[in-house]
Image (tube, rainbow, N blue to C red):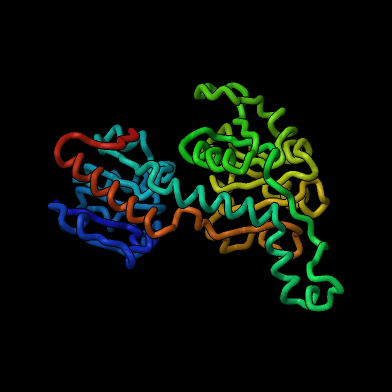
Amino acid sequence: MKGVILDFDSIGPTDLDLTALYELPVEWEIYPDCLASQVAEHIASADIVLTNKTAIRASEMDQSKSLKLIALFATGTDIVDLVAASEKNIVVSNAVGYGTASVVQHVWSLILALTTNLKEHSKASIDGRWRNSRFFCLLDSPIQELEGKVLGIIGAGELGLGVAKIAEAFGMKVFFAALPGRSHSNQDNRMPFEMLLKESDIVSLHCPLTAETAKLIGADELQAIKKSAFLVNTARGGLIDEQALKSALTKGIIAGAALDVLSVEPPSEGNVLIDSFIPNLIVTPHVAWIARESRQRLVGQVVENIQGFLSGEPRNQVN
């Protein structure tokens, strides 16, 4: 059986144990990266295709006559035409829950950096402000305690619940958003979306990007958030109207924001939020998930998905 990996370097394989992957009864053809124009050629004779962010559309499937399984090194499935795959009896599987510990840790590193004004304090120790102070400490940049503050979480999946667990250790009050027109899991601490924005000291996004959630946080929502509140997004960049966020930060409408995601990644043609003049904004390059332990679990889960498929019992099938 022939297998193709389209963009293997995107999971950083050099520090991972890949023994289980290579021991599968699959002859692998591995590409470090793959342009959209190369997909059809690369998968033309494959039975199994592994991909992280390289899209596979109906037109490529049409040219791959033996394709039986598309296994994703990711949870999100928007890069695969699931309807076309179902019509062609191609199983699509994803990976779930592998990066929870890594992402939750990153969320809290962002929250703590914002509430402790970490960037500004670090700068002050270098640019001479501390050296020239008459006192042993600087009081220029305020620090907020988390105890007693309200954390509003949008998205009550594994990541949202993981972030909530840590919040409780800090003595925070946690509420999950009830989005209009949506069914929700049965948390007893649900709050209507509009109310959650107004009540929260920190708003953290953990919901998928869909037609309904695109630009979920826009100018009106940012106006509703407390002036002293922070916005954190480690989910998908498209959940936020980026121009509206830039305006809110530069005008002091909210206190700050921290993002691990942007609407287009990488921002090779620039992004309105990649601007050193925007106050109290932290942007990290989509790294919340990349702890080595997380990526090792990811490979292990993909291997299990392939094993399940080969044994006639597909795992994590999404179509």
In the image, 134: left or right of 290?
right
- The quadrant of the rendering that contains the C terminus is top left
The location of residue 255, given as percent across then percent down, is: 76, 49
The residue at the point 44 percent across, 46 percent down is 100
The image quarter in which residue 272 lies: bottom right
Which residue is painted at 61% across and 54% down in the image? 110
Exactly how many numbered labels are in the figure?
0
Image position of 189 (left or right of 118): left
Q: Nearer the viewer, residue 50 or 144?
A: 144
Q: Who is closer to the viewer here, 156 or 37?
A: 156
Horizontal and vertical percent position of residue 166: 55, 43
Q: Is residue 40 above or below residue 81?
A: below
37 with respect to 222 (left or right): left
Residue at x 35%, y 44% (from the top left corner)? 95
Q: Residue furthest front?
A: 136
Q: Relative to 108, say whether 269 is above or below.
A: below
Instruction: Answer with the quarter of the image where residue 226 lies.
Output: top right
**From this viewpoint, is residue 239 visible?**
no
Closer to the camera, 139 or 179?
139
**282 or 247: nearer the viewer:** 282
User: Furthest-right residue in view?
Assistant: 134
Q: Horizontal placement of 12 versus 277: left or right? A: left
Where residue 93 appears, as percent x and y from the top left, is 31, 40
Query: Where, by quadrant of the figure, is residue 11 drawn?
Result: bottom left
| 184 in relation to 170, above or below | above
> Image point 53% across, 36% down: which residue?
210
Tell me if I can see residue 130 in this picture.
yes
